[in-house]
Amino acid sequence: MTDTPTPARKSRTRAVHAGTRRSQYGEVSEAIFLTQGFVYDTAEAAEARFVEIGPDEYIYARYGNPTVAMFEDRIAALEGAEAAFATASGMAAVNGALVSMLRAGDHVVSARALFGSCLYILEEILGRYGVEVTFVDGTDLTQWRDAIRPDTRAVFFESISNPTLEVIDIAAVSRLAHAVGALVIVDNVFATPVFQDTLGLGADVVIYSATKHIDGQGRCLGGVILGSKTFIRKTVEPYMKHTGGAMSPFNAWVMLKSLETVELRCRAQAASAQAIAEALEARAGLSRVIYPGLPSHPQHALARAQMEQGGTVIALEIEGGQAAAFRFLNALEIIIISNNLGDAKSIITHPATTTHQRLSDAQKQMLGITPGLVRLSVGLEDPDDLIADLSAALQAARQA
Ligand SMILES: *Cc1c(COP(=O)(O)O)cnc(C)c1O
């Protein structure tokens, strides 16, 4: 029995009900079908299912599973996508979306401000298989216009980008890409399913690391690729089901239940992030506060036009370089030092020495990943406590 509300229902209703498949027991909380395989009544039934798989029929958990299908349907309903394929991690989703559609000789244009592992796929892996990639400053439409060619098959970017929070004009880049028939693939982790209608703005494919805001409590790895039924079923699914990047049913259950609260959590975290960014902006000891919700952000107007809130992450540049940034991190008492984001717990990261350590000094400089830059993922704690913690650590950072 499936229980999929009509698309007219509002997002918070879809987040709680969409995709539910109730078993014969009528359970309220969705079941975990922790099973790899599925039993056929007869040999003929097994044969028939391998010839053509019907709706809500399953063969093997690498291809699909009822709990995973509930997660896929619910996130698709939230995103307004025709279809979704859930993956083992965010990187399995990025790799799956790109490699399933590209062939030797294809051309891709990508923003250069990318999560380190995304950069590895675009810079290292695609080239090995004969795909040419041109990198551009994602905030500069002239560079996109110059780089997109008649043989460009896809454009790829993160908006907002990690960790310097650049905002990319999704509608404008999509128009340029669509003029040559290229697919627009957006890694939407920082904008979350909540703040931005990425497909509505013109993107064709949206990718999430569900590890971040969708889980939101730091438990499981997961990812998802969303797009048209044709792209997901004909391009992504054959690649994913034969190469093994499927999401586990247990992780799908965690992600499914977390979708019920993702909007409430993200909105509260973004409201705190806005308050913290405003409170810190003029503070001594900080040379920059980067947050799309601040009027001082270079793409603030664009952020306001395409996003409902500024997101849950703030980048801060501590005066005094790496030594001062480390003193700042070490003095924090509530905010923990780690490298995840989107968690209920506020997390601080020093990108230059951790998540983006692999980049050359020239690349770091080009992307604004300075020795003093720290990335703050704002959690669900009381924002007053977070501002007090950050203020005390800023004092400590200044006492060399
Ligand atoms: C974390 C992250 C990923 C990778 O997700 P995993 O679930 O860790 O594999 C990809 N893109 C962005 C923007 C991320 O923040």
Image (tube, rainbow, N blue to C red):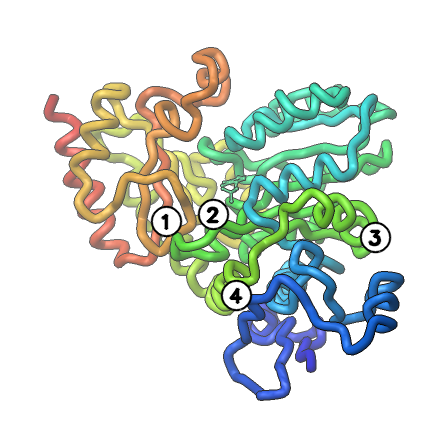
Name the outermost residue toward the top: 362
Residue 310, which numbered label?
2
Q: Secondary structure at mark 1?
A: helix
Badge 2 amino acid: Gly
Question: Separation of disc 3 and disc 1 at Cα?
Answer: 38 Å
**Which residue is painted at 55% across and 37% down in the image?**
167
Label 1, ligand 1: CB separation under 8 Å:
no
Circles 3 and 1, Cβ within 8 Å, touching? The answer is no
Instruction: List the residue tagged with mark 3.
Output: 230
Badge 4 amino acid: Trp
Label 3, ligand 1: CB separation under 8 Å:
no
Badge 1 amino acid: Ala
Instruction: List the residue tagged with mark 4.
Output: 253
With 298 as the anchor, is 50 left or right in this view? right
Q: Position of residue 28 (x, y in %)?
A: 52, 83
Within 10 Å of disc 1 (Cα), the crowding (few <14, some 14-19, many 20+) is many
Q: Is residue 352 above or below residue 274?
A: above
Query: Which tag, 4 or 1, sits closer to the chain's start?
Result: 4
With 248 as the anchor, is 371 left or right in this view? left
Name the outermost residue toward the bottom: 25
Q: Secondary structure at mark 4?
A: helix
Query: Which tag, 2 or 1, sits closer to the chain's start?
Result: 1
Instruction: Report the mark closest to the observer, 2 or 3.
Output: 3
Q: Position of residue 46 (x, y in %)?
A: 81, 68
Res 368 → quadrant: top left
